[in-house]
Image: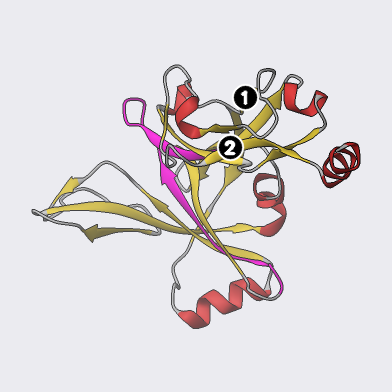
């Protein structure tokens, strides 16, 4: 998986007014969530923009509120690729993260907010990975049309095992047949979509139906 370099600026004002103000300047509010729990009461030192959010059983997680510019995340968001993000924060601290969630404006599609999730070597993460079809389906040769039903699949794996794409060979895919999630197997990762979900299929085209009807 490729790495994307990104710098975040800690946020102090996090209310609605402050958030609207920075958005008008082309700046996007963001939050970094850490996976490693901390004991409460927390006795460590928090950096600028950090706070501890209580979870359960006297445990909490450190959340960092910061901002990024639209220009700096454009190539991270508007791309078919997936990235491990090296997020640089105040004090020279760099954290390995992935994009967890993005909120878009319902009308303009402008980016309103981004959630990042810190990743660790021994803790699996979940990402949506692009599906790439390879080969020439038998059903297409017989007059069918190959349809990609799921462009991305949810993958659970360690971050250093996360693939950039999921190749699916369709050579043996016949007319009227489909490949489901449960038919696929990849090393060092788990697909967590429903096993009966259709990834791709070959369907008879309208033209081919017409020819078959005329022949009959």
Q: Are marks 2 and 1 in contact (CB under 8 Å)?
A: yes
Q: Is residue 113 magenta?
A: yes
Position of the C terminus by quadrant: top right
Closer to us: 201 or 106: 201
Earlier in the chain: of badge 2 and badge 1, it is 1
Q: Is residue 136 magenta?
A: no
Start-end of magenta stretch: 108-129
- Residue furthest to the front: 216
Residue 136 percent coordinates (x, y): 77, 20
Residue at label 1? Answer: 168
Residue at label 2? Answer: 199
Q: Which circle marks residue 133 in the picture?
A: none
SS at mark 1? strand
Q: Residue at x 42, y 46 (%)?
A: 117
Q: Residue at x 65, y 49 (%)?
A: 77
Closer to us: 191 or 79: 191
């Amino acid at each position: 998986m490729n790495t994307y370099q990104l710098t975040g600026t800690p946020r102090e004002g996090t209310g609605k007014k402050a958030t609207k103000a920075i958005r008008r300047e082309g700046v996007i509010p963001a939050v970094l969530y850490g996976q490693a729990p901390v004991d409460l009461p927390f006795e460590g030192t928090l950096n600028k923009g950090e706070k501890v959010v209580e979870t359960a059983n006297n445990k909490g997680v450190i959340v960092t509120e910061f901002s990024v510019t639209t220009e700096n995340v454009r190539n991270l968001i508007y791309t078919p690729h997936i990235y491990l993000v090296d997020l640089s924060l105040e004090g020279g601290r760099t954290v390995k993260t992935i994009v967890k969630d993005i909120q878009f404006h319902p009308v303009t599609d402008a980016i309103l907010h981004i959630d990042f999730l810190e990743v660790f070597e021994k803790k699996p993460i979940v990402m949506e990975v692009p599906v790439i079809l390879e080969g020439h389906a038998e059903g297409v040769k017989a007059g069918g049309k190959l349809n990609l039903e799921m462009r991305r699949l949810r993958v659970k794996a360690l971050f250093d095992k996360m693939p950039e794409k999921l190749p699916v060979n369709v050579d043996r895919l016949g007319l009227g047949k489909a490949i489901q999630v449960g038919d696929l197997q990849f090393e060092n990762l788990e697909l967590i979509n429903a096993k009966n979900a259709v990834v791709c299929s070959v369907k008879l085209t309208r033209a081919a139906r017409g020819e078959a009807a005329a022949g009959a």
